[in-house]
Amino acid sequence: MNAGVSKVMMTLGVALTMSLSVNATDLSEDAVNKRIAPIGKVYLAGAQPAAPAKPAGPRTAADIYQTTCFACHGTGAAGAPKKGDKAAWAPRVAQGIDKMFDHAWKGFTGSTGVMPAKGTCMNCSEDEIKATIKFMTEGM
């Protein structure tokens, strides 16, 4: 192959590569969710999709704390304020329940630690999260 054809092929290859790359200039939450959304579901022949798990009954804030929150709020992992630690909870309580709920629901990274969205309780309702916050901060 001569040098001219080689340069043309290289240029076409680079142009094709550049034109096929994802140009993720819109970094809004909506745009990112659309880009990473599954495009389909796969089931084995004859298999039915699994029904979503339904809770056996309403969960108490204490149950949710023990099963989901204790890993961090019982040990202080990731900078989480421990249940009953008034000094650690004071600045958060001062912000009010609405701010604490917002951080718990959406997730938050602060100067003292990280709060994952929904406290990793992906099947918790808003009311359950609020009740659990109240449970962890009662008496403060």
Image: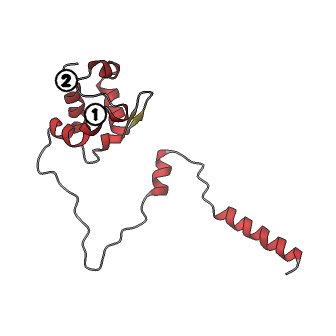
Q: Quadrant of residue 120?
A: top left
Q: For the residue marked with disc 1, what is the amino acid?
A: Thr
Tell me which residue sits at (84%, 71%) in the image. Answer: 7
Vertical position of residue 104 compared to residue 11: above or below: above
Please tell me how crowded label 2 is: few (under 14), some (14-19), or many (20+) other residues with Cα within 10 Å. few
Asked where in the image residue 111 lies, by quadrant, the reply is top left
Report the disc number at residue 75: 1
Residues at badges 1 and 2 in contact (C-beta under 8 Å)? no
Where is residue 126 shown, x and y percent of the image? 26, 39
Residue 138, which numbered label? 2
Label 2 sits on what residue type?
Glu
| Total numbered badges shown on the rendered structure | 2
**Does residue 86 appear in the picture of this structure?**
yes
In the rendered image of this protein, does residue 95 appear above or below residue 75? Answer: above
Depth check: give the residue in front, 86 or 138: 86
When the figure is inspected, residue 139 is found, relative to residue 114, above or below; the finding is above
Determine the residue positioned at 76% across, 70% down. Answer: 12
- The residue drawn where x is 26% and y is 19% is 86
